[in-house]
């Protein structure tokens, strides 16, 4: 072949607006045909080109990521082609920092032939949650956590039918207490009695407070079927009770103030199995330095849809629903929630469907069921089985799980339920069980542990099942003050975490199961199997995810301490390679005369442009559209695409380009301007569909790499499936992953 390239190109380009080529004075149809014929013969093996062929292995896709895990925390998301937990060299096709509670839409360049990807979300401690997903043809939506966990909503829907499902209730109808004949409450009226409201006649009577009233209301304390509707302000006496069947309603604008050392309580009516009821409507408030107490009644419950900021809330066997707000008001109390002592065998339940900020939760006899947002500033002590529903968020200053050696105390957590303990942790025979599919429950501890105990072989006393554990780097390997020797103490907490005696938190004990896309125990390295009641399918603490840190084992295989490094974030962006013919020859088709690569853009849309190969001798400069990138390429190195000096890639960074939002790297007009031997300048850019190419765009492999052909080896020899792909875009779309090793530059990353 002769050096006919220029004129051939010129005519080929004439039909498709590729600037400079069709302006060359010496172009001829004959030379164009010669180049195309050579390409068809040498590269395509005599086949016709697929008219749909664009000589580009990349496509663009839109991925919408929402993160709803831990309030206001920043998470870093990577999209990769291989699982970064098992392939430490995964290159990322997208990277974004997403603050929990937010959603980001990413437009990415990806290999068009690859459908399955991984979305890996890292917290600040490098703890990772990895989700495999299939790229959809339109927008692909991926969620970490459920939206409701980050944006506290009142009365949000709870799940049904699961062991963690919280049974929620609506406010009962209050119209019989707020409408009809209501008698205004005032002190004189209360003290003197009334012929209108005769306290002793046993009939149903309804009072109201619309102004300011201070003092007792004897009727609701002494008789059933009485009510008081507060839309003014009521300051209660030292001991005001609301007896079984009677009702206090705080309406919109109404306030009940309970002074210090005063108490307002619902009073059990043992004959009827009921108790007095207190309902706070939206806009109503109960506040003060005193105590609000709910007594047990099997058929009744109290309900808050307003605001409660008293100093103490005592649930003494009753059920109290919060669908409004408790605490969290500047300058007012975060109530301390107290249940009965553990020996009292009566139901005492706090059910939260709204936002509750409590000073503490104490008393071993209380169950806590959180379906929305619960913050406990101090200690949260759970002495009975409790629930945290899908997407709920629970935070506490310290955590005590005081269970039972019968194994019947378990915290049931739903999908993406998040429990964050910020201080000391104390556990005694208590299980924490999450969902067996969907989003994991997340259980996060600090580095403080004061007590750990369990009963061997009883899952309910020790099992952390289907729960994602987050622990800090300095989490103690030994606990010294639980009455056991230190070694045993260390083992106990690992056992509690994992449902197996002496099992360590070691990712090496797991392997990736591609059938289920999850981490499963690796039988070849599984060290301990001595807990007969905990079967493999429940050894799921790490399933599908991974901890931030690995534990180092001593000679006996017991953990001695944690070290970071369990999860390494993908460190390298992926790359798109633009491989050019420079018009110097028309018959080698090695597509290495210039190879540049453009990175996955950073968060500001800035991508790096590297010079990878200079397999031509003509003067040549790289452009993005009309913007020059770097200098003439031979100023960075000399001709020789397979010179051993150049096995380090890249040769040089030429510069950066901006990838505008909504567009991707593969859509950039990366082109070169070549100075011909006659001094003329010719621009070589990407082909139109079905056009003989002088530029191919190739996506990197899972590690972001592509190996171009050695000098003078045509691309079909280096990649035997390239020609078949050229003739049919559906054939071998991953041709670029299958080179002939001796025919390509198998480069290493430059130091
Ligand atoms: Ca060439
Ligand atoms: Ca070459």
Image (cartoon, rainbow, N blue to C red):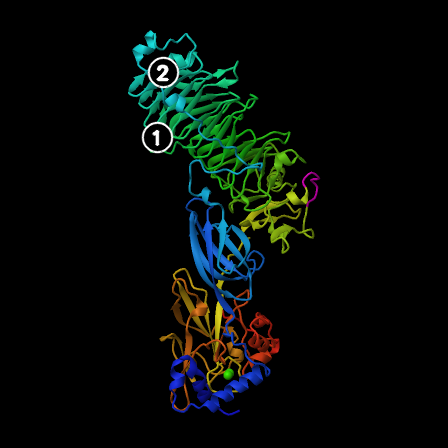
Which residue ends up furthest to the front in the rendered image?
Answer: 180
**Disc nearest the viewer among 2 and 1:** 1
Position of residue 690 relative to residue 500, above or below, is below
User: Which residue occupies 46% across, 22% down?
Assistant: 294
What label sits on residue 569 in the rendered view?
none
* SS at badge 1: loop
Is most of the magenta stretch helix, strand or loop? loop
User: Which residue occupies 62% across, 36% down?
Assistant: 462
Image coordinates for residue 322, horizontal then vertical, percent? 44, 31
Identify the residue under disc 2.
237
- Comes first in the chain, label 2 or label 1: 2
Magenta span includes 496: no
Position of residue 358 relative to residue 257, above or below, is below
Identify the residue under disc 1.
283
Is the C-beta separation of discs 2 and 1 under 8 Å? no
* SS at badge 2: loop
Image coordinates for residue 50, horizontal then vertical, percent? 54, 76
Between marks 2 and 1, how big is the CA–CA gap? Answer: 23 Å
Say whether residue 77 is visible.
Answer: yes
Image coordinates for residue 150, horizontal then vertical, percent? 44, 43
Position of residue 158 relative to residue 248, above or below, is below
Q: Is mark 1 within 8 Å of ligand 1?
A: no
Q: Nearer the viewer, residue 287 or 650?
A: 287
Q: Nearer the viewer, residue 26 or 648?
A: 26
Left/right of residue 409 with respect to residue 624 in the rendered view: right
**Region in magenta:** 528-534
Left/right of residue 507 with respect to residue 109 in the rendered view: right
Say whether residue 261 is visible.
Answer: no
Image coordinates for residue 582, horizontal then vertical, percent? 46, 83
Q: Nearer the viewer, residue 694 or 44?
A: 44
Classify mark 1: residues with Cα within 10 Å, few (<14), some (14-19) or many (20+).
some
Magenta span includes 530: yes
């Amino acid at each position: 072949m002769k050096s006919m390239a220029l004129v051939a190109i010129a005519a080929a380009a004439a039909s498709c607006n590729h600037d400079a080529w069709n302006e060359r004075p010496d172009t001829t149809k004959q030379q164009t045909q010669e180049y195309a014929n050579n390409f068809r013969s040498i590269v395509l093996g005599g086949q016709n080109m697929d008219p749909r062929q664009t000589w580009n292995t990349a496509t663009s896709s839109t991925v919408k990521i929402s993160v709803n895990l831990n309030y206001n925390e920043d998470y870093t998301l990577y999209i990769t082609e291989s699982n970064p937990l098992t392939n430490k060299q995964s290159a990322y096709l997208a990277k974004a920092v997403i603050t929990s509670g937010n959603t980001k839409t990413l437009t990415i360049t990806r290999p068009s032939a690859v459908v399955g990807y991984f979305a890996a979300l890292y917290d600040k401690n490098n703890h990772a949650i990895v989700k495999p997903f299939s790229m959809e043809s339109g927008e692909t939506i991926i969620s970490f956590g459920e939206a409701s966990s980050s944006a506290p909503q009142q009365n949000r829907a709870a799940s049904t039918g699961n062991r963690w499902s919280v049974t929620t209730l609506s406010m009962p109808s209050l119209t019989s207490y707020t409408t009809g004949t209501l008698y205004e409450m005032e002190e004189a009226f209360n003290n003197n009695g009334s012929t209108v409201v005769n306290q002793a006649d046993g009939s149903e009577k309804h009072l109201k407070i619309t102004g300011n009233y201070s003092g007792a209301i004897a009727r609701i304390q002494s008789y059933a079927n009485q009510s008081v509707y507060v839309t003014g302000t009521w300051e209660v006496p030292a001991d005001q009770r609301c007896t079984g069947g009677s009702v206090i309603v705080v309406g919109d604008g109404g306030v009940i103030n309970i002074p210090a050392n005063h108490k307002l309580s619902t009073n059990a009516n043992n004959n009827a199995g009921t108790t007095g009821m207190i309902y706070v409507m939206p806009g109503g408030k109960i506040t003060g330095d005193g105590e609000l107490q709910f007594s047990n009644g099997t058929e009744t419950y109290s309900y808050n849809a307003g605001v409660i900021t008293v100093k103490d809330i005592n649930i003494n066997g009753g059920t109290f629903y919060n669908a409004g707000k408790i605490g969290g008001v500047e300058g007012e109390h975060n109530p301390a929630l107290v249940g009965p002592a553990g020996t009292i065998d009566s139901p005492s339940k706090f059910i939260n469907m709204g936002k509750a900020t409590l000073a503490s939760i104490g008393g071993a006899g209380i169950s806590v069921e959180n379906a929305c947002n619960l913050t406990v500033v101090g200690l949260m002590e759970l002495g009975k089985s409790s629930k945290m529903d899908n997407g709920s968020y629970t935070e506490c200053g310290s955590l005590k799980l005081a269970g039972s050696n019968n194994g019947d105390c378990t915290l049931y957590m739903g999908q993406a339920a998040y429990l964050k303990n910020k201080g000391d942790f104390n556990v005694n025979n208590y299980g924490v069980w999450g969902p067996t599919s969907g989003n994991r429950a997340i259980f996060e501890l600090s580095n403080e542990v004061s007590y750990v105990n369990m009963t061997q072989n009883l899952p309910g006393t020790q099992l952390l099942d289907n729960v994602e554990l987050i622990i800090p780097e300095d989490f103690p390997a030994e606990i010294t003050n639980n009455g056991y020797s230190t070694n045993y103490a260390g083992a106990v907490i690992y056992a509690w975490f994992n449902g197996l005696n002496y099992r360590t938190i070691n990712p090496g004990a797991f392997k990736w199961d591609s059938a289920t896309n999850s981490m499963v125990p690796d039988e070849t390295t599984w060290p301990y199997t001595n807990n007969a009641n905990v079967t493999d399918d429940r050894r799921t603490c790490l399933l599908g995810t991974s901890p931030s840190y690995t534990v180092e084992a001593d000679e006996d295989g017991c953990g001695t301490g944690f070290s970071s490094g369990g999860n390494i974030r993908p460190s390298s962006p992926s790359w798109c390679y633009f491989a050019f013919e420079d018009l110097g020859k028309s018959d080698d088709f090695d597509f290495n005369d210039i190879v540049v690569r453009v990175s996955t853009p950073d968060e500001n849309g800035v991508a790096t442009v590297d010079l990878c190969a200079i397999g031509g001798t003509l003067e040549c400069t790289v452009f993005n559209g009309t913007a020059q990138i770097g200098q003439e390429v031979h100023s960075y190195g000399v001709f020789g695409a397979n010179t051993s000096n150049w096995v380090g890639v890249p040769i040089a960074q030429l510069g950066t380009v901006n990838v505008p939002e909504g567009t991707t790297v593969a859509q950039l007009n990366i082109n070169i301007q070549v100075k011909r031997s006659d001094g003329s300048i010719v621009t070589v850019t990407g082909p139109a569909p079905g056009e003989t190419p002088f530029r191919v765009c190739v996506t990197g492999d899972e590690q972001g790499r592509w190996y171009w052909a050695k000098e003078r080896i045509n691309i079909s020899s280096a990649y035997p499936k390239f020609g078949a792909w050229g003739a049919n875009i559906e054939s071998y779309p991953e041709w670029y992953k299958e080179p002939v090793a001796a025919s390509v530059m198998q480069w290493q990353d430059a130091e």
